[in-house]
Each structure stands twice: as C-alpha cells, then as structure tokens.
Amino acid sequence: MNCPPLTITFLGTGTSSGIPMIACNCEVCTSADKKDKRLRSSIMVQSETTSIVVDTTPDFRYQMLREQVKKMDAVIYTHPHKDHIAGLDDIRAFNFFNHKAIDVYANEITQKALKNEFHYVFAENKYPGLPDINLFDIPAAVFYIGDIPIQPIKVWHLHMPVLGFRFGKFTYITDANRIDPAEKEKIKGSEVLVINALRHKKHISHYTLPEAIELADELQIPQTYFTHISHQLGKHSDVSFKLPAGKAIAFDGQRLQF
C-alpha cells in the first residue's frame, strides 16, 4: 500500500464509561493528571488532503471542538456499540460548513444499528438540517478514502465481528479479544499498532494489558500504544513506568506522525 504521510490523533482513549467514571472516587477517576482524563475511544487520520474519523463516540462534538477540526471527509466505523456510534448526529456541522454530505463506511451490523438509532437520517422526507450522509459498505480488500489506503481487519469482540483498520504502516484495533491467524497476517509489518487493553484482570470481550503486550510481541510490532482504557488499569503514570520498551499507554490528544 502506497500511503501518504499521516497524522494520527487520539480523540479518546477510554472505555465505554470514560474516565473519570460517573460516581467513582478511585485514585484514577480523581487524578489531577490530564492523561488520566479519557473520553470514549476514537482516532482521526489525516493526510494533507483527507481527514477521516474512526467512530463517532458520545464525546464526538467535544472531541472535534478540542482538536479544532474544520474539515471531515469520512467516518469509518469499527462496530455498532453505543460508545462508538452515538455521536453521529453531530456531523451536521460539517455538512453545513463543508457544504457536502459526509461519507460513512460501516459493515452490515453497524449499518443496521445506525438505521435503527438514527432512523430520521435515513427517512425519505428529511427535516431540513438533519445529518446528510452517504452510506457505504466496507469491503474486505484494501479501499481508499481520498489518498488514504485502508485495509480492514476482522477481529472478535467475544462473538461480535469488529473491524480494525490498517493505514499504511499504522494499525488501529479496538474492542477485541481474539484475532484469527489470517487477519494477524494483515497486521504484520506495521510500524505502529494501537490495541485495546482494558485492564489487568481477565475480561470476557477485551484484551487485558498482558494479553495486548503478548499480541504485540507475537506480531513483532516495533511500537505499540494501548487504548480503550478503564479506570481498573490504574493511573497513566504508574502503568507507563512498568511497561517494556516499545509499549506505551495512549492518551487523549496525543498525535503520531508517519
């Protein structure tokens, strides 16, 4: 895949409840460290000409304001859970200021959820000012949005198929606890892997931090960042201090450039 230089922005790195979690007084949720403030997980992928957001979380509006995003070309979805799709309505602002519909890419189960949750977006007779989108299937093979190549990677969130995405030498995977061998081959050769690492204790549908480290080592990824973090993982500074070389906890607002 020929890929232009990219900037990756972590819009959010928290799990479905975010950090701080409502009503929690633990040391992570009450931490003064900005790196312990985590919105729901999402990234933005940008070349000089193209801007893509992966997942529109419940925090999407604030994420766009915080990063001062003025242009968005497309949204691609990993899966239909609420913490990954709930912010779709707020693309209306991009419709208005960019003067165009937004291309939205999703697999079949996510499209079904979008049409259920945001039925008014897909109505034949739409009320003025509602989100304007072009909905596309995500193919199995590499496809392009603008000048950015995207390789979908199917992973498993317990029994739910979830899509990770490889952009050149950067791979992003969230909400997974199993990857089939053939899909792992699509990740190999990446220079950077972002993978969910919910907590230390075993979880039914997410990688734990030890499992995520083991996966990165198996795939021989030079640099791995962990995302979709819960308060159960611990404080950013405490966990980061103990990580092996080439492993790091991602934080909100962090930027990577290739």
Image (tube, helix red, strand yellow):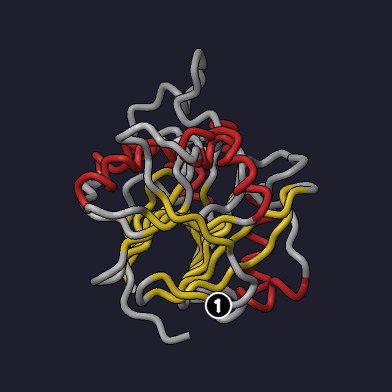
User: Image quarter for residue 215?
Assistant: bottom right
Query: Seen from this angle, which residue lies furthest right?
Result: 159
The residue at 60%/48% (across/down) is 111
Q: On the rendered structure, is 82 left or right of 155?
A: left
Q: Quadrant of the C terminus?
A: bottom left
- Residue closest to the far bottom: 2
Q: Which residue appears at 66% of the width and 54% of the height?
A: 108
Q: Residue furthest top?
A: 23
Residue 33 sits above or below residue 146 on the image: above
Q: Is residue 16 above or below residue 216?
A: above
98 or 10: nearer the viewer: 98
Residue 102 relative to residue 85: left or right: left
Residue 172 at what x, y percent from top left? 52, 61
Residue that label 1 marks: 142
* Residue at (37% x, 54% y) in the render: 102
| Type of amino acid under label 1 | Val
- Residue 84 lies, in percent from the top left, at 53, 42
**Residue 112 appears anywhere in the view:** yes
Q: Which residue occupies the foreground of this view, 115 or 251?
A: 115
Dot 1 alpha-carbon crowd within 10 angstroms: few under 14, some 14 to 19, many 20 or more: some
The front one of 257 and 149 is 149
- Report the residue at 73% width, 63% height from top: 179
Give the secondary structure at mark 1: loop
Where residue 9 appears, as percent x and y from the top left, is 34, 55
Residue furthest to the front in view is 125
Q: Quadrant of residue 146?
A: bottom left
